Image (cartoon, grey):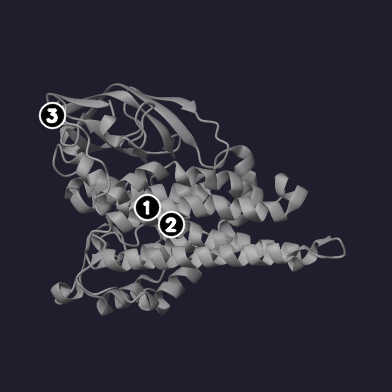
Amino acid sequence: MFSVCRSCFSAIRNRLPIIEHGRRFSAHAAVNEAKEPDTAQLFTQEHKELRRSLGRLIEQDINPYVDEWEEMGQFPAHEVFKKLGQAGFLGVTKPTEYGGLGLDYTYSVAVAEELGHINCGGVPMAIGVQTDMATPALARFGSDELKKQFLEPSIAGDVVACLGVSEAGAGSDVASIKTTAVKKGDDYVINGGKMWTTNGFQADWMCLLANTNEGPPHQNKSLICLPMDAKGINLSKRIDKMGMRCSDTAQIFFEDVHVPQSYVVGEEGQGFTYQMIQFQEERMWAAASILQTLQNIIQATIEYTKERQAFGQPILNNQSVHFRLAELETEVELLRSLLYRTVGLYVQGQDVTKFASMCKLKVGRLGREVADSCLQYWGGMGFTNEVLVSRLYRDFRLISIGGGADEVMLSIICKYMNTLPKMPQKK
């Protein structure tokens, strides 16, 4: 077991400015707000130590079993999360009073990058759901009671979390969800369903977005901590996906599911806003978690094409091949710079909606581009399931769909550019 030395991170925290809700603030915030972040200083020796510790855990407890989990169609989330939780990796930015390390978001990015060494997309995605999709709103806005009941065991790896936002008729269009939570006595009674739920079959609780009143669609939703053993929850279908094979994905229905009204995260009716905030960390995390994997694919392709001969010379000797790999490496470094700039602004407390959307858009497209281009140079081997590049070719296709489709990212960017056409007012 490779544990993060909590005494070491106590020392790290003492050298950092005050941290609130995973962001960095200082007495000079007003001055720093206008400064561009120094991305060269984004990662320190402490970040590198954190990554090395996680890297050892990946090589010992995850990568040796990935092929088996891919064949099974599910990895043992409770077992893996417990090891990650014991080592401190599931609550890097979460408050110390609930078992987290209380560090700023740059450390979460360092962890996400190191997870890119896992030899599949499914396990890192499932970890990201636990750390950066289902729990950020709870950590920021939840009551002390909810944090103790749901956040603390999630950080420890004692429970598995999932996020219930997407539905069969509402994916990226979050405002259109139909699941309802109606007050009855001291409870909410939940009816409806959720689709594409990562970790759904293994989850102990869900961060559920539901309509809690009949008001406008951006003001009638609430986030609710929903225990997955509640009566009336039906895990209807295990979805058979083309990629992310070892990450279980569920279709779930709710029929008169009772949950206490005290399980609402923050204020009732603010769920849409909370989820939009939560999406920003999800999108930065998505970009960070792919960076290392993209580099690994390019490097593996370089090594393969050095050895593979065609027409009397290594394939890599062809100018079209080594030039293309140079272009791909350049694109990866450009994405890294965009991500680091975005994260630097985020820890200063600035709105990064536009830049986080750019990161998400770029990583989805670049993931497809790198995997497709590199697979081509593997020839017939690239079309088999015996090499990593073919697995990642399938896994990476999801990035431009899940967590906000490319088209939604473009719309957000256009909104911030003031180029998005205004919708006609309904009469």
Q: Amino acid at mark 2?
A: Ala
**Measuring 43% from the left and 28% from the top, which residue is drawn there?**
251
Q: Amino acid at mark 3?
A: Gly
Q: Earlier in the sequence, mark 2 or mark 3?
A: 3
In the rendered view, tell whether residue 167 sits above or below residue 26. Answer: above
Q: Which residue is mark 3?
A: 215
Q: Residue furthest right?
A: 312
Q: CA distance from mark 3 to mark 1?
A: 28 Å
Which image quadrant for residue 209? Answer: top left
Q: Earlier in the sequence, mark 3 or mark 1?
A: 3
Using residue 1 as the reference point, say whether residue 410 is left or right of it. left
Q: Amino acid at mark 1?
A: Arg
Please tell me whether mark 2 sits on a helix, a strand or a loop.
helix
For mark 3, does the 10 Å Cα neighbourhood hold few (<14), some (14 to 19), or many (20 or more) residues?
few
The image quadrant where one finds the C terminus is top left
Find residue 6 and name its label: none
Residues tagged 1 and 2 counted as in contact (Cβ below 8 A) = yes
Using residue 294 as the reference point, say whether residue 424 is left or right of it. left
Residues tagged 2 and 3 counted as in contact (Cβ below 8 A) = no
For mark 1, does the 10 Å Cα neighbourhood hold few (<14), some (14 to 19), or many (20 or more) residues?
many
Find residue 283 and name its label: 1
Residue 45, position in %: x, y? 42, 79
Residues tagged 3 and 1 counted as in contact (Cβ below 8 A) = no
Residue 266, position in %: x, y? 16, 44
Which image quadrant for residue 421? Answer: top left
Q: Which residue is mark 2?
A: 287
Q: CA distance from mark 1 to mark 2?
A: 6 Å
Q: CA distance from mark 2 to mark 3?
A: 35 Å
Can you see residue 119? no
Residue 224, position in %: x, y? 24, 37
In the rendered view, tell whether residue 190 sits above or below residue 261. Answer: above
Q: Nearer the viewer, residue 250 or 314?
A: 314
